[in-house]
Image: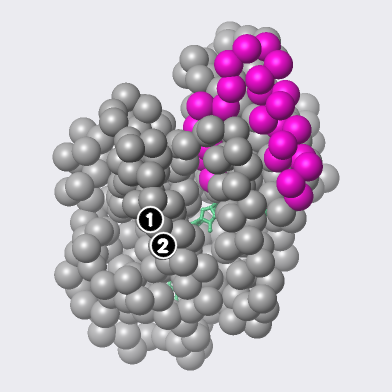
């Protein structure tokens, strides 16, 4: 059992990972400002865990606060020391993630993503906590070809959001190089996480109009939005629509647990790792699969390309296989089925939801 600090743990990927950490018996300390999430996601973890007859017994500590606030971070580390031990590792999910918003409000993104991380790293170092897994993104690459993106592919992000992620990776690399015998760092570069926990109790709950494709599709299917607009039908891809590497959020969460174990069990190191399936799916293919699996219809129309988009991003996951002896297991059909179940059970996300299940 380890003590793990999870930043942004109420969010989409964080909440699914917290569930697995608790199921593995870890004690977790979650900090989240709820700028893009609801406290209900973590409340629902207890429902899932109780259904599995696992007892939480004070294993989940929740703090509402912003990572740029030193006081709350220091308090968490102090609290973790109270019953002996200390924070063993940090899973750092907190951050803002909308590409379009990052074009409109770059300062907000640099502050929320980079300054938060610097603050976190300072408090970690002061507490001699030197193991961190960072939520990086395929957005740091600039892939223009159908070739698989490897960890050595060019880093040259095309939007401010991706640039904040690339800079944080650079900061973490500099820190590692300054004391490579003490730090354990993993930059996990996620491709496109979608889907939800198969129970339908937790899932993705974007505030306002979704900027990502999958939650837009589920909301159109549910009748919350009239139609999907597809950004471009003239990309140099198999059917003219953008191709991405979609990965089930539960696979992504499992990837974190693998990476955590790998880091804690091995000597200090810096790891840059893609988390993707190695398979490319176009927008039209995703719609078709979603319609077929869930027997629903997704009306759509084409509009111009979106600023900051790339035609195709698919991960090479060879390094992941070698290092973690693991690759994602779930299919596109699983992602569509589980994501739809979450949407059906929670038509308005966590807001106004009926908690009596
Ligand atoms: P999310 O918005 O659901 O979760 C992020 C959480 O961080 C939210 O709960 C939010 O309230 C919290 N947060 C944001 N800024 C904070 C701050 N300053 N202090 C405290 N809490 C703060 O997003 P997600 O999809 O779960 O993504 C998690 C991480 O993974 C993010 O860093 C994101 O950039 C990265 N990522 C996501 C995707 C994706 O498609 N979902 C892809 C690649 C990388
Ligand atoms: N996309 C789209 N309509 C939308 C949202 C996204 O056509 O409303 C397309 C987008 O152009 C890209 C793919 O869907 O080709 C995945 O977009 P998303 O924003 O989910 O992920 P990212 O572009 O960050 O990889």
Taking depth in this image into account, of 327 and 296 the one nearest to the observer is 327
Indicate left or right for 252 with 69 as reference. Answer: left
For image coordinates 58% across by 54% down, the residue present is 117
The residue under label 2 is: 170
Q: Are marks 1 and 2 in contact (CB under 8 Å)?
A: yes
Taking depth in this image into account, of 27 and 117 the one nearest to the observer is 117
For image coordinates 22% across by 50% down, the residue present is 317
For image coordinates 39% across by 68% down, the residue present is 140
Q: In this view of the protein, can residue 37 be seen by the observer? A: no
Q: In this view of the protein, can residue 178 be seen by the observer? A: yes
Q: Using the rendered view, name the quadrant where residue 76 is placed.
A: top right
Label 1 crowding class (10 Å Cα cut-off): few <14, some 14-19, many 20+?
Answer: some
What is the number of the mark on residue 173?
Answer: 1
Relative image position of residue 238 (x, y in whole percent): 23, 76
Question: How far apart are labels 1 and 2 at the CA level?
Answer: 5 Å
Relative image position of residue 91 (x, y in whole percent): 52, 39
Magenta extent? 69-92
């Amino acid at each position: 059992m380890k003590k793990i600090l999870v930043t942004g743990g109420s969010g989409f990927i964080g909440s699914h990972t917290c569930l697995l950490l608790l199921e593995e018996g870890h004690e977790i300390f979650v900090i989240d400002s709820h700028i893009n999430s609801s406290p209900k996601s973590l409340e629902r973890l207890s429902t899932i865990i109780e259904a599995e007859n696992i007892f939480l017994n004070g294993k989940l500590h929740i703090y509402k606060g912003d990572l740029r606030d030193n006081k709350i971070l220091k308090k968490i580390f102090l609290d973790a020391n109270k019953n002996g031990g200390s924070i063993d590792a940090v899973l750092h999910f907190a951050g803002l993630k909308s590409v379009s918003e990052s074009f409109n409000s770059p300062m907000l993104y640099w502050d929320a993503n980079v300054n938060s991380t610097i603050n976190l790293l300072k408090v970690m170092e002061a507490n001699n906590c030197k193991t961190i897994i960072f939520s990086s993104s395929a957005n740091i690459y600039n892939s223009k070809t159908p070739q698989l993106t490897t960890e050595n592919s060019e880093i040259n992000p095309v939007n401010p959001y991706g640039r904040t992620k690339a800079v944080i990776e650079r900061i973490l690399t500099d820190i590692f190089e300054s004391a490579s015998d003490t730090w354990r760092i993993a930059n996990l570069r996620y491709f496109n996480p979608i889907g939800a926990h198969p129970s339908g109790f937790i899932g993705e709950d974007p505030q306002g109009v979704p900027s990502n494709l999958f939650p837009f599709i589920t909301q159109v299917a549910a009748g919350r939005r009239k139609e999907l607009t597809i950004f471009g039908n003239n990309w140099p891809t198999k059917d003219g629509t953008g191709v991405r590497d979609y990965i089930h959020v539960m696979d992504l969460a499992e990837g974190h647990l693998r990476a955590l174990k790998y880091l804690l069990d091995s000597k200090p190191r810096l790891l840059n790792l893609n988390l993707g399936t190695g398979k490319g799916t176009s927008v039209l293919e995703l719609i078709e699969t979603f319609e077929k699996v869930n027997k629903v219809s997704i009306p759509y129309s084409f509009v111009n390309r979106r600023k900051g988009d790339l035609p195709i991003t698919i991960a090479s996951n060879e390094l992941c296989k070698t290092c973690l002896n693991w690759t994602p297991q779930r299919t596109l059909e699983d992602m569509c089925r589980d994501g739809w179940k979450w949407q059906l059970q929670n038509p308005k996300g966590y807001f106004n939801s009926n908690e009596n299940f």
